[in-house]
Amino acid sequence: MSAFPHARYLKGAHEPSQFVADTGVEVVFAGRSNSGKSSAINAITQRHGLAKTSKTPGQTQLINFFELEDGRRLVDLPGYGFAKVPRPLQAHWKGLLETYFKSRESLKALFLIMDARRPLGDQDWQMIEYSHSCGRAVHLLLTKADKLSRSAGASTLARVRREVEGRASAQLFSTPAKTGVEEARRALKRHLNSKEPSVGEPTLGEAGPTLETRGQ
């Protein structure tokens, strides 16, 4: 049985006016376009196809809102790292991201998805620092852990935890091997049950994460 049997897609937003009502609690998922974010969402929620997956990076173009339970939401951000789009569009996504993080009182945590073989890139750090400065918790999923040996995975996890100490928690994750799925699900439920306020007024750096916006 699904961990979230009533999970459903609510809407996608291209403008702040299209965000769902800022009530209840939500957790946002972000990551590079090839990090396995959609597969991770589907594995954690036990809902195949809840988030669209594709062999082509960049299928998420909007900020997509999903209701997991009454008053509990998962939000899927566009992937970043491969975009070759006009500067005006990049500026639009940067502004939309800032507005989302600064304005959503219901936002409690960021789940940042990154390939365990290439963790903590510059844009990953931007997301970690930005979310942390906004007062939101950060949890890192080091995906594709099945591509690493057990010792390499343990070494990578230890290094990442040292580097993000005080800013984020981290774990290994693999959708096909089901590594860390239950651990991630517990973390998601813990943050969805959080009552701590989340506020902040920072801004992203001049560049900000480059969001992927290719066709869906």
Image: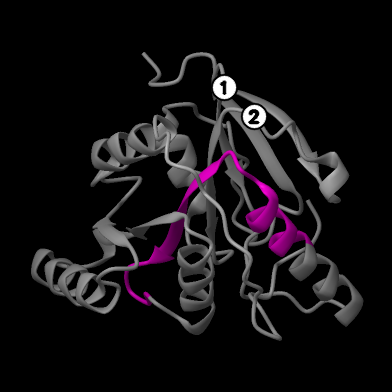
**Rendered residue at 62%/31% (across/down):** 66
Q: Horizontal placement of 181 versus 81: left or right? A: left
Q: Is residue 173 above or below residue 129?
A: above
Colour mapping used in the image: one colour
Q: Horizontal placement of 206 versus 115: left or right? A: right
Q: Which residues are magenta?
A: 96-119
The residue labelled by disc 2 is: 23
**Rendered residue at 15%/71% (across/down):** 158
> Marks 1 and 2: CB-CB under 8 Å?
yes
Q: Is residue 202 above or below residue 49?
A: below
Q: Nearer the viewer, residue 20 or 154?
A: 20
- Judged from the image, the secondary structure of the residue bearing numbered disc 2 is loop
In the rendered structure, does residue 32 fall within the stretch colored magenta? no
Q: Horizontal placement of 106 versus 36: left or right? A: right
Q: Is residue 21 above or below residue 196?
A: above
Q: Quadrant of the N terminus?
A: top left
The residue labelled by disc 1 is: 71
Q: Horizontal placement of 25 versus 102: left or right? A: left
Number of disc labels: 2
Mark 2 closeness class: few <14, some 14–19, many ≥20 residues within 10 Å: few
Picture coordinates of residue 24 (x, y %)? 58, 28
Q: Amino acid at mark 2?
A: Thr
State the image quarter where residue 160 is shown: bottom left
Q: Nearer the viewer, residue 44 or 105?
A: 105
**How many angstroms separate mark 1 from mark 2 (CA)?**
7 Å
Q: Amino acid at mark 1?
A: Gly
Mark 1 closeness class: few <14, some 14–19, many ≥20 residues within 10 Å: few
